[in-house]
Amino acid sequence: MAVCRSIGPFYEVASTMPQLTPDILNDVVARGNSGLVTRRQAFSQALDATCEVSVNEYGLVEQADLAELLEASGLAMWIRVADEALLAVMPESGGLLPKADADADLPENLAILAQKIGPDVLPEGYQPTDSTTQRSEKFADVFAQAGIVDGAGRVVLAVKRDDGTEAPLVLVWPATQIDAVFSRDVESNAEPNAAAHGDSDTAQLPPYSRSLLRIKVPVSVSLAVSKRPMSQIMELGQGALIQFDKSCEELLDIEVSGHKIAEGETVKVGDKFGVRISQIVLPGERFHRVQ
């Protein structure tokens, strides 16, 4: 049985996690060609423009052939899976990344990009356990820090903006030297322990309020909704086709007690059906007339 521990938006799985090896190259390519809506949305939000993402090329790393990339600067994203990581780099020379001082903090939309694309670049069965994004002045230093060697897996995604500007996103794995990058885990791992000792927000609630947290509520996933005349409903039978206006690429609605709380996409969890949450839906504002 897998035991999961929440780390921010991810879950750490205590059961055996598949290793990141070059052997999963074809699986990463297939994932890159899947045209996931969430991946396009992540890049569109991060780059503040409509973007399309597709696989450009793939193979094994030969650093002698990556001389130009290794000398470039840009965005370096680390997507951790257990004790290894997938490294994704995008050079500034592609024209998609905003120019910024090396010492300046990353804009929030870029800082969380690795977190958003992690589940969408890894094959099924590989669950990200953490991620981080940083600006790099020279990708050669990042490759050396990560322990990337010749023979590692490599997939190049083409990220194209609606104005025609295109930049590569180079995925390489496995990155085996990740302790220094994820040293901040020491602090984040302490948070669940603090909660266990009564320091969480819910622990501060009155007993009658905490009791409400034990109430089970129905969680449902809605594919699409449409209204039809009763005359059409009465004509339904085996083999009848009901068409909806919703596109096949749109996200599914996740509802709790009939209230929409999130949107997500379908995933396979073992031999079961699941939904990966892509975005949380904020409750609508309510205005009351002042008497």
Image: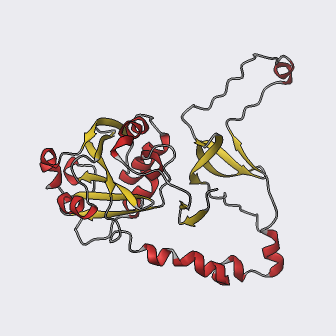
Residue at figure coordinates x 36%, y 48% from the top left:
21
* Image label count: 0
**Closer to the camera, 175 or 49?**
175
Give 84 or 222, whichever is nearer the viewer.
84
**Residue at the location (80% across, 67% down)?**
214
Q: Is residue 193 left or right of residue 133?
A: right
Nearer the observer, 270 or 121 = 270
Q: Quadrant of residue 196?
A: bottom right
Residue 192, compared with residue 113, is above or below; it is below
Asked whether residue 31 is in view, the answer is: yes
Percent x, y for residue 207? 81, 80
Q: Is residue 48 above or below residue 227?
A: below
- Residue at image point 47% right, 78% down: 187
Asked whether the viewer can see residue 291, the reply is: no
Where residue 24 appears, x then y in whole percent?
A: 39, 42
* Horizontal and vertical percent position of residue 272: 66, 41
Residue 114, quarter of picture: bottom left
Q: Image quadrant of residue 209?
A: bottom right
- In the picture, the quarter occupied by the N terminus is bottom right
